[in-house]
Image (spheres, rainbow, N blue to C red):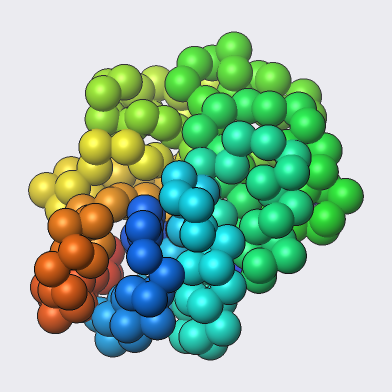
C-alpha cells in the first residue's frame, strides 16, 4: 500500500479527530457531532474493549471516513477492517501489521520517530507515515528536519497537538493530515458534551481552511 492510497481515501480531509471511546452507546452521537463540526474523517483507537463496535457504528454513519488507530497486531488490523475501517494507523512500525493490511487492501500508516524508522517504512514500499508522538519529539522542527532529506514522504503528525499548534503543521507541504484528540476527549464523552465536540471540531476545520 502507498501513501497515495491514503490520500485518495481521505480525499482532502486534513483534520483527523483521534478518538478513544469507552462506551459504544456514544458512538452514533459522536459521529453526528464530528460531522456537524465539519470533520470528514476520524480515527478510532483500539484502546478499549468495544473499539470494533464503535468503529462499526461510526463507519455506518456515512458522513465520515473512519479508520482504526493504535493497531498493534495483525489480528487487530483484521478486526478493524471487518468492522469497516478504511485505513489503519499504528503507533510504531510492525511488519506483520503492514503485511496484513496489504493483504486486506487497506492503506496502513505506521508510526515513526526517527529517520531510521522512516527508511524502514520506505523500504517496505510505504510513503506516508505517522509522526508520533509529534510534540514531545520536537514538533514542527522535527517534521521539517525529517521532510528535508525525504522529499517524497507524506506525514500525519499526531501526539500532543492542540489547536494552537495546528497551523504550524498544516503549513508544511509534506503534511497530509493532522491527528488530534483534543476535539473529542473521553471527558467530553463522559459528560455527553457533544455540543463542545462540535464546537472544537468546527474551530479546527476553520483553522485548517486559512
Q: Residue furthest top?
A: 116
**Residue in view at x 40 percent, y 82 percent:** 28
User: For this rendering, which residue is in front, 51 or 147?
Assistant: 51
Residue 142 in the image: x percent, y percent? 34, 23
Identify which residue is drawn at 82% across, 57% down: 105
Q: Nearer the viewer, residue 144 or 70?
A: 70
Q: Is there any visible trace of residue 27 in the rendered image?
A: yes
Q: Is residue 179 left or right of residue 150?
A: left
> Horizontal and vertical percent for residue 157?
39, 40
Q: How many marks?
A: 0
Q: Which residue does the image show at 17% across and 74% down from the upper left?
A: 192
Quarter of the image holding residue 106? bottom right
In this rendering, would 1 be left or right of 139? right
Residue 72, quarter of picture: top right
| Side of 95 relative to 137 (left or right) | right
> Residue 86, position in %: x, y?
65, 65
Q: Determine the residue located farthest toward the right in the rendered image.
A: 103
Q: Nearer the viewer, residue 187 or 205?
A: 187
Quadrant hosting residue 159: top left
Q: Is residue 10 visible?
A: no
Q: Identify the residue shown where x is 26% and y is 23%.
A: 136
| Quarter in which the C terminus is drawn | bottom left
Amino acid at each position: 500500500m502507498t501513501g497515495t492510497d491514503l490520500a485518495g481515501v481521505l480525499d482532502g480531509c486534513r483534520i483527523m479527530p483521534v478518538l478513544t471511546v469507552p462506551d459504544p452507546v456514544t458512538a452514533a452521537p459522536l459521529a453526528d457531532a464530528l460531522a456537524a463540526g465539519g470533520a470528514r474523517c476520524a480515527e478510532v483507537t483500539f484502546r478499549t474493549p468495544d473499539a470494533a463496535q464503535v468503529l462499526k457504528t461510526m463507519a455506518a454513519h456515512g458522513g465520515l471516513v473512519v479508520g482504526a488507530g493504535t493497531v498493534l497486531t495483525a489480528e487487530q488490523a483484521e478486526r478493524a477492517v471487518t468492522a469497516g475501517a478504511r485505513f489503519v494507523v499504528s503507533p510504531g512500525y510492525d511488519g506483520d501489521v503492514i503485511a496484513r493490511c496489504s493483504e486486506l487492501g487497506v492503506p496502513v500508516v505506521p508510526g515513526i520517530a526517527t529517520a531510521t524508522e522512516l527508511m524502514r517504512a520506505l523500504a517496505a514500499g510505504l510513503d506516508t507515515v505517522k509522526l508520533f508522538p509529534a510534540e514531545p519529539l520536537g514538533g514542527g522542527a522535527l517534521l521539517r528536519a525529517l521532510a528535508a532529506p525525504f522529499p517524497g514522504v507524506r506525514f500525519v503528525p499526531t501526539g500532543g497537538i492542540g489547536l494552537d499548534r495546528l497551523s504550524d503543521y498544516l503549513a508544511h507541504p509534506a503534511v497530509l493530515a493532522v491527528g488530534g484528540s483534543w476535539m473529542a476527549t473521553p471527558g467530553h464523552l463522559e459528560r455527553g458534551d457533544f455540543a463542545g465536540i462540535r464546537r472544537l471540531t468546527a474551530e479546527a476545520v476553520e483553522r485548517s481552511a486559512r
